[in-house]
Amino acid sequence: MAGSSFFALIDDIAGILDDVSAMTKVAAKKTAGVLGDDLALNAQQVSGVNADRELPVVWAVAVGSLKNKAILVPAALAISAFAPWAVTPLLMLGGAFLCFEGFEKLAHKYLPHEEEHLDETAAPEAAESEQDKIKGAIRTDFILSAEIIAITLGTVAGAPLQQQITVLVGIALIMTVGVYGVVAGIVKLDDGGLYLLRTGGKFAQRIGRAILVAAPYMMKSLTVIGTVAMFMVGGGILTHGIAPVHHWIADVSAPLATVPVVGGLLSVLAPSALDAVFGVIAGGVVLLAVTAVQRVLKIVKKK
C-alpha cells in the first residue's frame, strides 16, 4: 500500500509538472512579441554608457527587473482574485506612460525646448546620467513586465493557484534571464569583435572586423527600434483596451490579407503600424496634458 501510494504521488507530481510545462510553453509563445519589444527597448535604454560600465548597468537593470516581477506576480494574482476589472485600466495607464516616454524623447530631439544649463562637473553628471538610464530602463521594464505577467495570467487563469504561481514565476525568470542575457551580448558585441580581430585567424579576423563595422550601426538602429517599440507596445495596450478602436484596426487590416504574395505580411504589420500611430497620438496628448499641469503648478507656486 505504501509503495503504491508513493508511485501514485510520483504520478501526480509528474502530471502537475507536465501541465505546468505545457502552460509555460503557451505563455512563452503569447509573450514572445512583447519579449522582442522588451529586448529592443532595454538594449536602447542602456546604449551610450561607457564601455567599462555597460555590464554593471545591464546587471543593475536586470536586478531591478527581478524586483519589478517580485512585485508584479503577487499583485497580479491578488488583482485577478479580488478585482479582475482593474487589470485592463492599470495596463492602459502603463501603455499611456510608455507612449508619453516615447513622445517625450521625440519632442526633446526634434521640437524646440529650453536648453539645459550644464555645469563644469563632468564626473557627477556622468554618474547622474548612468543612474537616470538605469531608473528609466527599470521604469520601462515595469510596464513591459506587467504586460507579460498579465498575458501569462490570462493563459493560466483556469489552473489551480499553485500552478498559476509556478508558471508566473517560471515565465518571469525565463524572460528576465533571456532579455538581459541578450542585452549584455549586444552591448559587448564590439568587444567580441575586437577580441576576434586581435587573437583569431584570418577568417575570425574578418568576422571581428565585420562586427566592429556593424556594431555602431546596430546600436543606432536599436535607438530607433526602441522608440518605435514604445509606441507599438503602448499603443497596442491602449487600442486593445478601447474596443471601438481595436475593432476598427481589425476591420482595416483584414482586407490586406487578400493581397497577393505579401498579404499575410501586410495583415500582420498593419495592426502594429496603426497601434504605433495611435501610440504617437496618445503620447502627444499625454505630454501636452503633463506640460499644462506643470505650468499651472509653477504659476500657483509663484503666487
Image (spheres, rainbow, N blue to C red):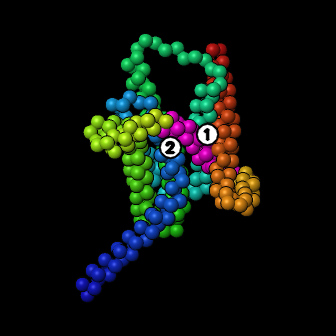
Left or right for 94, reference 6: right
Front position in the image: 33 or 147: 33
Front position in the image: 24 or 215: 215
Name the residue rendered at 41%, 51% in the picture.
Answer: 178
Residue most extreme to the front: 202
Name the residue rendered at 65%, 14% in the picture.
Answer: 303
Q: Quadrant of the N terminus?
A: bottom left
Q: Which residues are magenta?
A: 218-244
Residue most extreme to the top: 120
Secondary structure of residue under mark 2: helix
Q: Where residue 195 sits in the image (x, y, percent)?
A: 30, 38
The answer to whether the residues at label 2 and label 1 have Cβ atoms under 8 Å apart is no
Give the vertical position of 74 relative to 213 (above or below): below
Residue type at mark 2: give it: Ala
Q: Where residue 101 sits in the image (x, y, percent)?
A: 58, 35
Name the residue rendered at 67%, 34% in the picture.
Answer: 284
| Most frequent secondary structure within the magenta stretch | helix
Left or right for 180, reference 248: left
Tell me which numbered mark, 2 or 1, is placed earlier along the sequence: 2
Residue type at mark 1: give it: Cys
Q: Which residue is mark 1?
A: 99
Name the residue rendered at 45%, 63% in the picture.
Answer: 24
Front position in the image: 204 or 140: 204
Q: Where residue 103 sits in the image (x, y, percent)?
A: 62, 34
Q: Quadrant of residue 229?
A: top right
Q: Which mark is residue 40?
A: 2
Q: Quadrant of residue 190?
A: top left
Secondary structure of residue under mark 1: helix
Q: Where residue 224 sits in the image (x, y, percent)?
A: 56, 37
